[in-house]
Image (cartoon, rainbow, N blue to C red):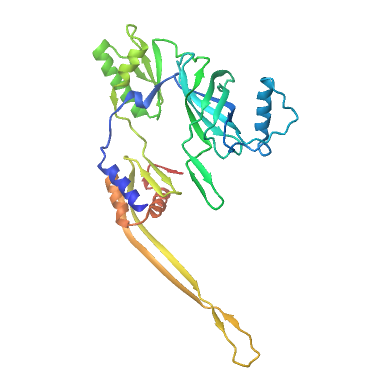
């Protein structure tokens, strides 16, 4: 773990301070977001790895309702087959897709099915958050994981209770694209005032060369207001400004994951000069009991005598000066202390408490 952390920090040091990205990669047109779809369905054709009807009564209810709609009356019957599984089907529908277009869907087991491998999803209606049905999904489920068990061993890989159906859903109701207006709003995926201003400057520099007028104005740290030239379509205008390079700015932030020992330090993180000492105290307690035997031909009893050995070692404790206005100086100061990732996490939290960490500290 320590080698991995040092490798990540070295990569951050050798990487350029800023990198230009395309506007289309950090923004999205307002009103052009995807719609999330969800539906409840049944997967059939499983080789005994489906839901048990006793533990998943909703599977039996859904199966009975489906057979009833097909003219087969199974009311009052106790179904005991294990080749059917209740699933939740989800998918994302982009804006502007026409009726008849296809999209991928994800199928996830809802009951106690052990695997969806080899199953086929029956026709499932997918609706949005407004309750309107937008698509219908059906097809063979593709599962990458597997779960094989025997009498003395079980072998599993991946997640066999979830799979995908490529192009498994057909759009039945289209979501209209944003209206073709001269005034549009561009939304930043990571809101920042500096990034918004740089986007506006890049678009205006392009518009001055192309149309001899400004075409963008900063509204907030999240949105940029665009004015499309009347002589250009929305598609062409968004395609051309989407390719313009911009150097996004980021907030100084340190992200800590205490579970995995991962520390990510942003480029603009600064630490006021502080003196840091870090040491670890290790205490080992060894119990080595011994037996006391009585003398021969005596009426004594064998008793257990406790024997305890305690050792205490305290390592580290050296004092180091940590501080600097660059990521290189910060990492060099932390490396001089020579602690593990868990120690770096504790040090950064203590520096933040002391008010010397000039950045946001996010602990996950």
Number of marks in the rendered image: 0
Q: Is 105 situated above or below 237?
A: below
Residue at 26 percent across and 17 percent down: it is 206
Residue 297 in the image: x percent, y percent?
A: 63, 93
Q: Quadrant of residue 84?
A: top right
Tell me if residue 194 comes above or below residue 177 in the rendering: below
- Choose between 80 and 19: the one closer to the eye: 80
Most extreme residue toward the top is 231
- Left or right position of 361 against 331: right
Specify whether residue 316 is in view.
yes
View extreme (right): residue:
76
| Position of residue 47 measured from the top left corner of the image (x, y, whole percent) | 57, 36
Q: Position of residue 140 (x, y in %)?
A: 51, 28
Is 293 left or right of 98, judged from the image as shown?
right
Q: Residue at x 54, y 38 (%)?
A: 115
297, 130: nearer the viewer: 297
Picture coordinates of residue 61, whole percent (x, y): 68, 29
- Viewer can see residue 273: no
197 relative to 271, above or below: above
Query: Is residue 280 toward the left or the right of residue 91 in the image?
Result: left
Q: In the figure, residue 220 lies in which quadrant?
A: top left
Between 296 and 198, the one nearer to me in the picture:
296
Q: Residue furthest left?
A: 209
């Amino acid at each position: 773990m320590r080698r991995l952390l040092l490798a990540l920090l070295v990569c951050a040091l050798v990487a350029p301070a800023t990198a230009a990205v395309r506007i289309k990669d950090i923004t999205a047109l307002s009103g052009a977001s995807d719609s999330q779809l969800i539906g409840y369905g049944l997967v059939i054709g499983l080789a005994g790895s489906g839901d048990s009807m006793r533990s998943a009564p909703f599977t039996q209810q859904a199966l009975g309702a489906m057979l009833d709609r097909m003219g087969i009356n199974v009311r009052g019957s106790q179904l005991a087959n294990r080749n059917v599984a209740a699933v939740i089907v989800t998918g994302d529908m982009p804006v502007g897709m026409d009726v008849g277009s296809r999209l991928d869907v994800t199928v996830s087991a809802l009951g106690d099915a052990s695997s969806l491998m080899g199953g086929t999803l029956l026709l499932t209606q997918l609706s949005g958050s407004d309750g309107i049905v937008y698509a219908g999904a059906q097809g063979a489920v593709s599962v990458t994981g597997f779960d094989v068990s025997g009498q003395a061993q079980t072998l599993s890989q991946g997640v066999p209770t979830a799979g995908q159906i490529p192009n498994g859903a057909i759009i039945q109701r289209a979501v209209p694209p944003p209206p073709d207006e001269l005034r549009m709003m561009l939304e930043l995926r990571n809101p920042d005032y500096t990034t918004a201003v740089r986007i506006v400057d890049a678009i205006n520099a392009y518009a001055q060369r192309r149309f001899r007028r400004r075409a963008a104005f900063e509204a907030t740290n999240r949105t940029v207001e665009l004015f499309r030239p009347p002589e250009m379509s929305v598609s062409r205008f968004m395609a051309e400004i989407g390719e313009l390079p911009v150097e996004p700015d980021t907030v100084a932030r340190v992200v800590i994951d205490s579970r995995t020992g991962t520390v990510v330090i942003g480029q603009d993180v600064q630490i006021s000069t502080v003196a840091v000492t870090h040491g670890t105290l290790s205490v080992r307690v060894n119990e080595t009991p011994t037996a006391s035997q009585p003398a021969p031909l005596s009426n004594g009893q064998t008793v257990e005598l406790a024997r305890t050995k305690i050792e205490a070692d305290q390592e580290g404790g050296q004092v180091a000066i940590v501080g600097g206005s660059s990521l290189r100086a910060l990492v060099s100061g932390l490396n001089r202390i020579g602690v593990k990732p868990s120690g770096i996490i504790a040090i950064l939290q203590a520096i933040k408490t002391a008010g010397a960490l000039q950045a946001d500290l996010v602990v996950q």
